[in-house]
Amino acid sequence: MPLTEPYDDHLPQEDPVALDGALGNPDDNVVTDTSGASGPTTTGDGPAAEPEPTLPESVRQRIVTLTAAVLPTLPTDEVPVPLRRVAKFAPNRRARLGAPVIAAQLTADPLFRQRVTARVLADAGDLGAAVVEGTAPAAADPVEVAALAYLARPRGWRELIDASGAAVRAEADSAVVAELVREAEQRATRAEHDRAVARVEAEKLRDELARVREELGQLREESRQVARTLRETQARERKATELLATERGRAARASADVDAELRRARARLAEAEAAAGVARASAKEARSVDDARLWLLLETIGQAAVGLRRELALDPVDKLPADFVADAFAEQPGTAPAGPAARARDTDDPARLDQLLALPRAHLVVDGYNVTKRGFGEMSLEQQRKRLITGLGGIAAQTGDEVTVVFDGAERMHGLPPAPRGVRVLFSRKGETADELIRRLVRAEPAGRPVVVVSSDREVADGVRRHGAYPLGADSLLRRLARS
């Protein structure tokens, strides 16, 4: 039987030898040409040798191990070409990875096997001498004896291998029997343990049965008490049923009285609705008159406003209230807050921003970094400012509203692109934050003008709400910019 080991892609490929014939060549005198020529060459015209004996697995492994151990000690010219790379392997990898090539060379190259045998027998000492003489000490390891006999091949070496194989199989059988005996002892121990556990469980079950019987007696007594209670309850139920029938009669009479009263109330309601219809018609006619009067009043006020503007020679202004704050906010950080107005109302509706921007002359104030760091914080500050200002320019162009964006900064940033038409860009000065500047912008607006402040800062939202502005979260503006 051949030596079998896992194939290694790193082993030399010059001499492919079929592993089915490794350590099992029927002719000991066959020599394989290591230069790559295939085909056996006989050393004489002697009779054909007997086939290789069947080797136990342990014997095959021991032969490969002995050969791998002496392989590095051979001169390089005595090592077959396919084994020269194997000889350079580490000792633990040499026997494991080079097993197929070593087995093939031992089978195909008698000269190599003799060189290996000489060194193995020298290392074996007395045991090697005894094997060469065709005897095996009784105390010797049968696997070692069989491996040495295979390599040295003295007279009667096949009988030594057969005897060693029988000894190995006997040891294996003894180990199996010992394992079976050990398992039987373990099963007996477990069975004894299970019997002890069963006895303990039986005692517990008997105690449990006594307790259950006691509880059963208690339950029977409770059942008798419940039965008595049930009979008393049924008697009370019959009395309650009689009382219920009496009350139902009274309820029927009361219901009839209520129905009669309801019919009378419906009649009165019909009369009231008729009177209300007449009143609505009169109110509609009166409202038409009032609308005409109101239109005439508004027309008069409009003409009066035009005349007053002409009388006072008021030209259109070049600056808005926020422009005055942008010019003077650093010099007047402590301006007293204006009184709260009633024009603000908080809302989380994303469409609320569009509704507020649709109001006439609306002013949109944006907390710059609060919005940019929430929407696109992965960018640099310069890219954040540029992206936000560009988006606000689109909103200003679409709505025509006044737009102011405020950034924190000790001094005005240099190198900013020109702001789009309708967008005012402000930076807070040293000693003042953007939140304070936003509140100053809101206070500067006249009462009645819609001012929308976009910031997710709760303190900013509460502050501008007290001054009548409409606070909205940063997400509403980010969604509006994404939609643009």
Image: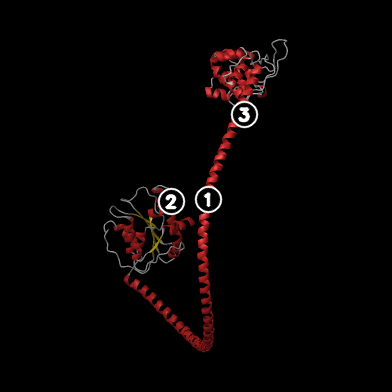
**What residue is shown at x 42% (from left), y 56% (from top)?**
392
Q: Foreground residue, 302 or 44?
A: 44
User: Which of the two labelled residues, at mark 2 and mark 3, occupies the earlier sequence position?
Assistant: 3
Q: Is mark 1 on a helix, strand or loop?
A: helix
Query: Which quadrant of the figure contains the N terminus?
Result: top right
Q: Distance between the residues labelled 1 and 2?
A: 71 Å
Residue 172 - label: none
Residue in the picture at 50% in, 65% down? 218
Drawn side of residue 116 relative to residue 48, left or right: left
x, y percentage for residue 230? 53, 74
First in sequence, mark 1 or 3: give its number: 3
Residue 334 location in percent, x, y?
26, 60
3D distance between C-alphas at marks 2 and 3? 77 Å
Q: Which colour scheme is used?
A: secondary structure
Locate residue 141, reporting x and y percent. Answer: 57, 21
Q: Name the residue under label 2.
A: 376
156 displayed left or right of 314: right
Mark 1 — residue? 201
Give the image location of residue 365, x and y in percent: 38, 59
Amino acid type for the residue under numbered disc 2: Phe
Q: Do the residues labelled 1 and 2 touch (CB within 8 Å)?
A: no
Q: Quadrant of residue 308?
A: bottom left
Residue occupied by mark 3: 173
- Look at discs 1 and 2 and give the one toward the viewer: 1
Q: Is mark 2 on a helix, strand or loop?
A: helix
Counting residues from the start of the chain, the first of labels 1 and 2 encountered is 1
Residue type, numbered disc 1: Glu
Mark toward the viewer: 2 or 3: 3
